[in-house]
Amino acid sequence: MGLFRSFVFLLMLYLLKGSNASLVQLNNNGYEGIIIAIDPAVPEDETLIEKIQNMVIDASTYLFEATENRFFFKNVSILIPENWKNITQYKRPKHESYKHADIRVAPPTLPGRYEPYTKQFTACEEKGEYIHFTPDFVLGKKQNEFGPSGRLLVHEWAHLRWGVFDEYNDDEPFYRAKSRKIEATRCSTGITGLNRVYICQGDSCVTNRQCRTDSKTNLYEKDCQFFPDKDQTEKTSIMFMQGIDSVTKFCNEKTHNREAPSLQNKMCNYRSTWEVISNSEDFKNTTAMMAPPPPPVFSLLKISERIVCLVLDKSGSMATYNRLNRMNQAAQHFLLQTVENGSWVGMVHFDSSASIKSNPIQIISNSERRKLLGSLPTVASGGTSICSGIKSGFQAIRNAYFPIDGSEIVLLTDGEDNTAKSCIEEVKQSGAIIHFIALGPVAAPEVIEMSTATGGIYDYASDEGQNNGLIDAFAALASGNIDASQQSLQLESKGLKLNSNDWMNGTVIIDSTVGKDTFFLITWNQQLPSIYLFDPSGISMGTFIVDSASKMAYLNIPGATKVGVWTYNIQAKASQETLTITVNSRAANSFVPPITVNAKMNKDTNSYPNPLIVYAEIVQGYLPILGANVTAFIESKFGETEVLELLDNGAGADSFKNDGVYSRYFTTYKENGMYNLKVRAHGGENAVTRSLRHPPNRAAYIPGWVVDGNIERNPSRPENDEDTQTNVESFTRTATGGAFVVSNVPQSPSSLDVFPPSQITDLEATSHEDEISLTWTAPGDDFDVGKVQEYIIRISESILDLRDNFDDALQVNTTALLPNEANSKETFTFKPGNISEENETHIFIAIQSVDKSNLTSKVSNIVQVALFVPQEDYIPDEIHPDPSPDKNPPKSGLSISALVLLVVGSVVIVSLILSITIYFLNKRRNPSRPRTGF
């Protein structure tokens, strides 16, 4: 039996791998299963569908060339909103849904903000979340500013699929090059153009001049922009500016610009985009094609009514651990609150056989919901036949004359079934979506495979009722194909084990973005508790509806709920009682997006001692919410819970600071097997939304083109203050992040330290006179927990030497540097020395952390400091002998002979100065300069 369970566990690891990813697969060099979803908020426009198809066709050809005849787009599904009119060629989706969309065509994040971007908050080489295109961009209205849509799709696809980053940087558009000149951040440096201040107001351009150097930064002033030449010969790089006609390749090891402060350099350790792509599984599993690929095949799929069938286990094992009653409580919450009006819901029970209790009926009012409540099981007995339950679910859907395609089966079971494998292929081919909720420590791996293959949700709930995992799992089953304003959002989910007369007290915040159809649910497992609920004015709310048989009470407020802090006091009336409270609500206004929380782990399977990363994204629409207190609760299969504070500080596990994604490493594994994730977010007075901050991976905006030496300017990008943050009222939210599996955890605790400090990723450096100041966020003894023992700081005149041979680089004396606790801000100042005069232009700096067990972190991000004042490049290069926009510049008053005399005299003076300088330098030079510290 032990060997069989080990086999089942390994099978679960395999089946869960990548279950949260998109449905895209690479088959014979072609990407299949791509989903492009048109948001329900987009007005109906059939032209948009045609433009999407043209964009993908152009992108496929461009992708094939850019990847050296290796990849193309094979088939694409376009999801059309339910509120668009029906057309014959529109089909019903199967597994495709908005939540799996790779590309979203949706309104801009803010009015006037049309730039495409990829939601990407993980590390280099890891896949992104989705691409966001606006309708105006797809319709071709922004081509001058961003380039052709097909080319830009390839740029964004590289973000999404291969985890590369941009080779420009809006925050650092210029840098100080080793050549002593100020250069535009770009790749490759073969891209030519002009650096100009070009300010327009309406149709009139009031400023058009060369850029000046800022005395504080020694870089070009804030308003300076790089204008590329319209006609180029350089072929790289797509991740810089794919809109240039000549650009058809990604930067490779030979053409890559490692000096530039691009996100690609910072995030991918100064590797080129092609090096990263070449290391991907896609690349390793394919070879170049000998013939051109076929054009993409499109499927037009229109969202239609939601059809759900609950398939509920009532086998004998459900009589233990209060499982049957907890299942009924969770199912009632789903039927009373979670499932949306207009949906069709049916019900099937199964043990060793199955029976249809209700064919799908449409939810129009509370009467249909109550009717379904009467169909829930009351007695647990018999064996377990999962296939019988699923097949009966299919039959119930057919009985209502609905197709199986796109229908949803919500399967809950608490055990394994050796016969489940017999219907795996039938389920995969059915077109239905299988959502699987595993109750207790044992899960059927065959159902995990069904859920993964059909794009369903897989979640797990332990037998510890106070963790409220089962209700949370059902609450996560809101439709993925409707606007967030129609979904039921969870505001609170909490439970406690209490003795008689003990209290569970707390508050829940109803903010102004929610408050419609608010639902309070209280559960217990022994005796009805005393329940008190007060609105923000202190008024006691009405009587809860009590279901003594299911041991639950609920209060539904169908209209608008008063905004503010609601207070609850619940007193246990029995010893060893378990109480829970769950609060849900919907958006108050369909035109104002509610604040939402999405949680996930970076992987669905993991092997000890590798760390996992917890992510929680808090947004309002597409705008990030900052400053919230975010806590993750990670529950093992036997109910032990680990609590983590998540951070949005741009350090450790968090890739980008202030992007609304809160992250943390998870390493405190309790046991092998399943875990589930729940996140609670609370926004107080310090929570703000950075409403005017652009996403970090937005498409490059082309301010204009240089044509025959003159600038042809594009419309100005909307003027926004990047630092503006608008206040957000207090709010509370909870969300589940699904299940994941961990293996190879030691059976007994080990005293061996296996976790090193996390990599420092936010190192910054500034110079003032002869001193260099460094700042960074402190890592911990174990990734981002605790305190490191020491820091090793090294410098080099070569960025590649520092990256590849860190231990051989010159070490800075850090004896006075005492590390602080993890996530504290560290500062250190030193004076550089031992830099050869001939290379005294700039130096590169990096840090490594060491913990008490002498485990070392990865080398930090590398920063550079210039040891010179860069040249102001007022003299244009030879490609632009006349950068002036004036076609008839005034003639110089100097004669040819005067110019010759001026040049000759200048050469003589410079030669004399150089001779004197070399003499004194040779006299001062110390031939035995030391090579050790400072």
Image (tube, rainbow, N blue to C red):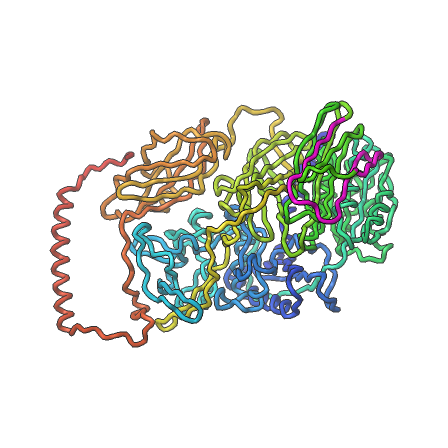
Image spot of residue 500 (x, y percent): 75, 23
Residue appearing at x 45%, y 27% in the figure: 852
In this view of the protein, can residue 580 be seen by the observer? yes
Q: Which residues, given as a range, are shown in magenta?
A: 543-572
The answer to which quarter of the image holds residue 298 is bottom right
In this view of the protein, can residue 277 be seen by the observer? no
Residue appearing at x 33%, y 50% in the figure: 217
Q: Is residue 549 above or below residue 341?
A: above
In depth, the one of 699 and 592 nearer the eye is 592
Q: Is residue 46 above or below residue 185?
A: below
Does residue 722 belong to the magenta stretch?
no
Q: Would residue 665 appear left or right of 739 to someone viewing this image?
A: left
The answer to which quarter of the image holds residue 110 is bottom right
Q: Would residue 743 appear left or right of 114 to someone viewing this image?
A: right
In depth, the one of 526 and 592 nearer the eye is 592
Q: Is residue 905 above or below residue 311?
A: below
Image spot of residue 915 (x, y percent): 12, 52
In depth, the one of 629 and 454 nearer the eye is 629
